[in-house]
Image (spheres, grey):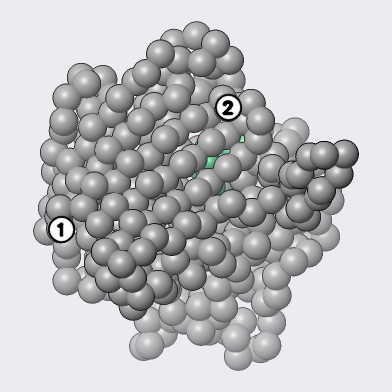
Amino acid sequence: MTTSQGIPAAVSDVRAAGGTLGVAVIGTGRMGADHVRRINEVISGARVAAVVDVDADRVRSVADGVEGAVPYTDPAAAMHDPDVHAVLIASPGPAHEAALLTAFEHDLPVLCEKPLTPDPGSALRVMAAEQRLGHRRVQVGFMRRYDADYLKLKDLLSRRSYGRTLLLHHKHRNADTPPGFSNAMMIHDSLVHEVDVTRWLLDEEITAVRVFRPAPTTHAPARLSDPQLILFETAAGQIVDTELFVNCGFGYQVRCEAVCEDGTATIGDEHGVHVNAAGRWGGDITPGFVERFEAAYDRQVQRWVDATRRGETEGPSAWDGYAAAAVCEAGVAAQTTGERVEVRMIERPAFYG
Ligand code: NAD
Ligand code: ISE
């Protein structure tokens, strides 16, 4: 049921009663378990009403640590629970479409971890279903848009503080990769963040992709071309490069340098406390994304809860998820063929502004 203002009835009731939003967290692996902790301990206005995982042992052990959280192994069953008012999807990308379509059947607001879906065809089906509802219900978990440094950079570039932006240089380094991580996952799981922040920072679509695969590090698993260098072209003629190195070994680093007509701006060189000792200087490198983007994840989830309680949906939309999937599809083709591949996208529907 939806109110005449387009607010899900359950959310409207929670708001009227001054209660907290009951969230079902779907997928309780690395990210899902961290989001459960975040909703339970860090942010306000929401509580974990249900946790869902196809792994029955895992979901039971996560539920055991959270008062009031009911464990489920079937996402659809959790979304039937009257105590569930909103859904946070943190299952693997290929499972997102089914969970999103079920959430729409119940008109439940969704925060969906990136990627929205792994390919443009499924993203289009999600967009079509959301448009049939007649109102936006999905925020995509592109958390870099909530990182304090990225927000400052976005502000500088939007105000043209140093003139037009000509180039972006991204660096995206992970210490290592989980078992089974493939070349295609380097695009869909890792590069998808540079795809999104490039579109967001420049306010331009990416039109073509090239991927270079230099001689790999000996630390990468067999068959993984690591590092890779990716070039984007934008509709406005800017060139954007990304060094993607997901088995660098030494820690987690995400950097971005914008080259503008009258200056440059760089983010991501944070090393915590800077120490001078024994003839050397230095600081720490964050071990992983959970630590590097902790504040951004917190802000992302709090903003989603606050908007949902107001009956609104904001932040990265299903359109942004679709656009990212279209660029990633071109990226995987460019990676496989070694050719420059143009991005194929539909026109942006008026529904997405
Ligand atoms: P993970 O493998 O650690 O956990 C996934 C969990 O989902 C597992 O417990 C698995 O049993 C469960 N699962 C699988 N299919 C399911 C289904 N159909 N329904 C319910 N549960 C199911 O993966 P992860 O690293 O936590 O990644 C989860 C999501 O978060 C992915 O979309 C990933 O891209 C995203 N992610 C985002 C960031 C970020 O920086 N924003 C970082 C890591 C992962
Ligand atoms: C992971 O899924 C993420 O989203 C991280 O932010 C990224 O750095 C990593 O490469 C991905 O595998």
Near mark 1 (Cα within 10 A), the count class, few <14, some 14-19 or many ≥20, is some
Residue 124 falls left or right of residue 19 = left
In this orientation, does residue 66 appear?
Answer: yes
Which residue sits at x=20%, y=19%? 337
Answer with left or right where residue 343 lies relative to residue 223.
left
Residue that mark 2 sits on: 248
* Mark 2 burial class by Cα count in 10 Å: few <14, some 14-19, many 20+: many
- Residue 172: image x %, image y %? 49, 40
Estimate the x, y position of residue 192 in percent, counting from the top left.
39, 43
Question: Looking at the picture, which amino acid does disc 2 mark?
Answer: Cys
Q: Based on the displayed image, in which of its 4 quarters is residue 28 positioned? A: top right
Residue 344, given in percent of the width and then of the height, sits at: 14, 43
- Please give the name of the residue rendered at 33% of the width and 41% of the height, measured from the top-left corner: 241
Considering only vertical position in the picture, is 72 above or below 226?
A: below
Mark 1 CB within 8 Å of ligand 2: no
Q: Is residue 319 left or right of residue 341?
A: right
Residue 318 visible: no
Closest to the observer, 128 or 239: 239
**Residue at numbered disc 1:** 236
- CB atoms at circles 2 and 1 under 8 Å apart? no
Q: Amino acid at mark 1?
A: Ala
Q: Residue at x 13, y 38 (%)?
A: 342
Which residue does the image show at 58% across and 15% down from the upper left?
A: 219
